Amino acid sequence: MPSFSPTPSLNSSIPTSPLTGLSCQLDESYKHIYLPTCYILTFLLSLALNSIVLSRCLRRPWNPSLIYMFNLALSDLMYSLSLPFLITNYIFQDRWLFGDPMCRLVRFLFYFNLYCSIFFLTCISFHRYLGICHPMRSMRLEAMRWVRATCLLVWTLVFAMTFPILLFARTGPLEDANIVTCWDDALDEDLERYMPYGLFLHIAGFFLPFSLTAWCYSRVVRTIWQTLRGAQRRKSIRTIVTITLLFALCFLPFHITRTIFLTMRARGAALGGCRALGVVAVCYKVTRPLASANSFLNALLYFLTKEPCGRGIWGRKDREQIGKVEKKRPAKGDGDWDNIYPRFH
């Protein structure tokens, strides 16, 4: 079975197929500066911004939007807490210092909270879609008990999806290096079994939720375009487009390059050899911090889209306009539909 084993050394010899003896010379020294620098910035921003969001959530009366935002900020905060271990790992040239159990736990928490964040972003988009496009039809689904049950289901489902990472991720020696590292996905001997699971995780954990998110926001944009006018319409649509593009920018390159990377690890010699393998490896490493950055961009985007005194991007008059067109929407809302994110005063 072809395999790929990254090493921290410059121009290291990497066997990619034990059957043919093919060996690749790849330089991965850049990641020991690039990745810890990006992760340190992400850790600090995510810790600060999500802590503020959580503290404000706890001081406000609960509503469906606030519950989703609280769970999103919590998953982003938990995600950032796994980063110091990875920062240390890259600073020490891929040398893992914390033992095999912590290796499994850190890798699990990294992906568990990453996909929780994706799922809660999808829940928020579906919540917006129901509230704007089908306000009366959504009343029962927006009941507090249903929203809490949805959040509990997300945590449970993502735990079940990512639990196998605890079995595949483990410490192991690097090729041509006398050190032990913490493998991100699976060792070469486990790669054949890991591939179907890795592809399933990418499809169910990202591509399907992203497709639903894009569809929901496209319908919201259409409704806003038909109901609002002038600067408020432009601002609302611009905010939604920004959120969707940030979702795609953070997660789409990471999952595309990681899918190709896993395939190249398993079939590298048959899919272009060392040159293609080297390009894919660099792209994968470069896109990893983009996925991590979403853990603070969610909170940052909330603060940037707020107006003075906590007004949402859709005010009372705008909601009344939407209600007149839909002929279902009450003129006065309870604040649940005010924003892509809930408002704080």
Image (spheres, rainbow, N blue to C red):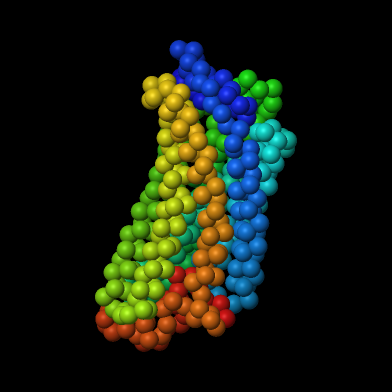
Q: Where residue 183 appears, x then y in whole percent?
A: 59, 33
In the displayed orientation, state which residue is furthest to the top.
20
**Residue 194, how many percent across, how many down?**
48, 32
The answer to whether 11 is drawn above or below residue 254 in the figure is above
Q: Residue at x 50, y 78 (%)?
A: 307
Which of the pair 151/223 is nearer the observer? 223
Whether residue 337 is situated above or below residue 151 in the rendered picture: below
Query: With 59 as the anchor, is 220 left or right in this view?
Result: left
Q: Is residue 36 left or right of residue 145?
A: right
Closer to the camera in the image, 91 or 160: 91
**276 vs 324: above or below:** above
In this rendering, does residue 182 appear at all? yes
- Residue 105: x and y, percent? 64, 42
Quarter that holds the C terminus: bottom right
**Is residue 121 or residue 6 the one in the foreground?**
6
Q: Position of residue 270 (x, y in %)?
A: 38, 21
Residue at position x 69%, y 39% in the image: 91
Name the residue at 60% across, 43% down.
Answer: 35
Total numbered labels = 0
- In percent of the image, x 46 and y 23: which residue is there? 274
Task: Answer with the quarter of the image where residue 314 lies.
Answer: bottom left
Asked if residue 204 can be seen in this view, the reply is no
- Camera-side residue: 179 or 279? 279
Using the image, determine if residue 42 lies above or below residue 345: above
